[in-house]
Amino acid sequence: MATKDLRFFDAPDAPLLPDGHPRRGMSVVAALSDRLIHTNRRADGSWTQRYEHGVPVTDLDPVPDDGTTGTRVHFRPAAGLTAATGTGLTDWPPHLTVEVRR
């Protein structure tokens, strides 16, 4: 989350996201967020970590097993950033849930 995804970050041929922008990696989302909380749930253990402006501010903290697996990312964009709500959200894969709260 805090390291550039070198597969896509400055690649001129990076795949396009559903909104038409090139893929840059989660480090960009983290860097442009006042706060981001990343939680991973795996069969062999689960953890969470919090970032502020792309910098980890907590260790990898274990979280109790709840019988599920997957990744959840909550973030608050930095002040002044805006998003065109609804743009391309219906084009995401069916296994991905996107929720925009204002």
Image (cartoon, helix red, strand yellow):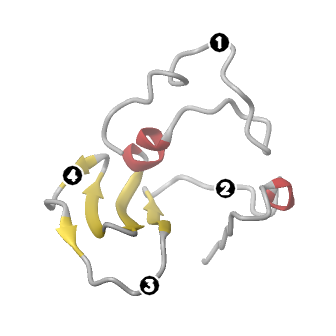
Tell whether 63 sits left or right of 7.
Answer: left
Q: Residue sitting at 66 percent across and 22 percent down?
A: 14
Query: Residue 5 is drawn in which quadrant?
Result: top left
Residue 79 lies, in percent from the top left, at 44, 58
Mark seen at residue 20: none
Image depth: mark 3 or mark 1 in front: 3
Q: Calculate the distance from the C-alpha at mark 3 to the C-alpha at mark 1.
A: 40 Å
In the picture, the quarter occupied by the C terminus is bottom right
Tell whether 47 sits left or right of 93.
Answer: left
Image depth: mark 2 or mark 3 in front: 3
Residue 78 lies, in percent from the top left, at 43, 56
Closer to the chain start, of discs 3 and 1, is 1
Q: Secondary structure at mark 4?
A: strand
Closer to the chain start, of discs 2 and 1, is 1
Mark seen at residue 12: 1
Vertically, is 45 above or below 91?
A: below
Q: Calculate the distance from the C-alpha at mark 4 to the C-alpha at mark 2.
A: 24 Å
Q: Are marks 2 and 3 in contact (CB under 8 Å)?
A: no
Mark seen at residue 83: 2
Q: Secondary structure at mark 2?
A: loop
Amino acid type of disc 2?
Ala
Question: Which residue is tagged 3?
Answer: 67
Q: Calculate the distance from the C-alpha at mark 2 to the C-alpha at mark 3.
A: 34 Å
Closer to the chain start, of discs 2 and 3, is 3
